[in-house]
Amino acid sequence: GRQFHDADRDARRDNEHALRLGAVTLRFTWQQVIHEACEVARVIERALRVRGWEEGIRACSDCRLVR
Protein backbone atom coordinates (compact mmCIF):
# COMPACT_ATOMS: atom_id res chain seq x y z
CA GLY A 1 0.00 0.00 0.00
CA ARG A 2 0.88 3.66 0.09
CA GLN A 3 2.73 3.29 3.37
CA PHE A 4 5.40 1.07 1.77
CA HIS A 5 5.34 2.13 -1.88
CA ASP A 6 6.15 5.32 -3.73
CA ALA A 7 3.48 5.37 -6.44
CA ASP A 8 5.37 7.71 -8.80
CA ARG A 9 8.63 5.79 -8.55
CA ASP A 10 6.84 2.44 -8.85
CA ALA A 11 4.91 3.59 -11.93
CA ARG A 12 8.11 4.81 -13.62
CA ARG A 13 9.86 1.52 -12.82
CA ASP A 14 6.92 -0.53 -14.07
CA ASN A 15 6.71 1.48 -17.31
CA GLU A 16 10.42 1.01 -18.00
CA HIS A 17 10.07 -2.72 -17.37
CA ALA A 18 6.98 -2.93 -19.61
CA LEU A 19 8.79 -1.12 -22.44
CA ARG A 20 11.77 -3.47 -22.17
CA LEU A 21 9.42 -6.48 -22.40
CA GLY A 22 7.42 -4.98 -25.24
CA ALA A 23 4.25 -4.86 -23.12
CA VAL A 24 1.40 -2.57 -24.04
CA THR A 25 0.16 -1.55 -20.59
CA LEU A 26 1.72 1.52 -19.00
CA ARG A 27 0.96 2.91 -15.55
CA PHE A 28 0.75 6.57 -14.64
CA THR A 29 -0.34 8.19 -11.42
CA TRP A 30 -2.74 11.12 -11.39
CA GLN A 31 0.10 13.32 -10.14
CA GLN A 32 2.29 12.33 -13.11
CA VAL A 33 -0.49 13.05 -15.62
CA ILE A 34 -1.22 16.46 -14.07
CA HIS A 35 2.29 17.63 -13.17
CA GLU A 36 4.50 15.73 -15.63
CA ALA A 37 2.31 15.60 -18.74
CA CYS A 38 5.21 16.11 -21.15
CA GLU A 39 7.17 13.23 -19.61
CA VAL A 40 4.06 11.02 -19.75
CA ALA A 41 3.70 11.89 -23.44
CA ARG A 42 7.34 10.94 -24.04
CA VAL A 43 6.85 7.50 -22.46
CA ILE A 44 3.75 6.92 -24.59
CA GLU A 45 5.70 8.05 -27.66
CA ARG A 46 8.43 5.51 -26.87
CA ALA A 47 5.83 2.75 -26.53
CA LEU A 48 4.31 3.69 -29.89
CA ARG A 49 7.69 3.86 -31.62
CA VAL A 50 8.56 0.34 -30.40
CA ARG A 51 5.45 -0.74 -32.31
CA GLY A 52 6.45 1.01 -35.51
CA TRP A 53 4.95 4.47 -35.16
CA GLU A 54 7.17 6.85 -37.09
CA GLU A 55 5.54 10.15 -36.24
CA GLY A 56 6.79 12.30 -33.42
CA ILE A 57 5.19 14.26 -30.65
CA ARG A 58 5.16 18.02 -30.72
CA ALA A 59 6.23 20.07 -27.74
CA CYS A 60 3.36 21.88 -26.08
CA SER A 61 3.59 25.60 -25.38
CA ASP A 62 4.34 24.78 -21.73
CA CYS A 63 7.00 22.09 -22.35
CA ARG A 64 10.28 22.63 -20.56
CA LEU A 65 11.87 19.31 -21.53
CA VAL A 66 14.57 19.27 -24.17
CA ARG A 67 14.27 16.62 -26.87
Image: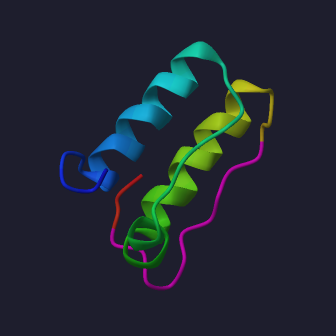
Task: Determine whether 44 is above or below 65 in the image.
Answer: above
Q: Residue, x 50% and y 56% (percent of image)?
A: 28
> Does the segment drawn in magenta span residue 51?
no
Q: Of residues 43 and 54, which is closer to you in this image? A: 43
Where is residue 40? Give x, y as percent. Answer: 50, 58
Left or right: where 1 falls relative to 22: left
Q: Residue, x 49% and y 70% (percent of image)?
A: 33
User: Which secondary structure dominates the residues rendered in magenta?
Assistant: loop
> Does the segment drawn in magenta span residue 60?
yes
Q: Residue, x 72% and y 38% (percent of image)?
A: 48
Among the 4 quarters of the image, the one containing residue 50: top right
Q: Of residues 17 and 63, which is closer to you in this image? A: 17
- Coloring basis for residues: rainbow
Task: Determine whether 32 is above or below 10 in the image.
Answer: below
Where is residue 2? Give x, y as percent. Answer: 27, 56
Task: Determine whether 5 is above or below 28 in the image.
Answer: above
Left or right: where 2 falls relative to 30: left
Number of marks? 0
Left or right: where 52 falls relative to 27: right
Q: Residue, x 78% and y 27% (percent of image)?
A: 51
- Residue furthest toward the left? 3
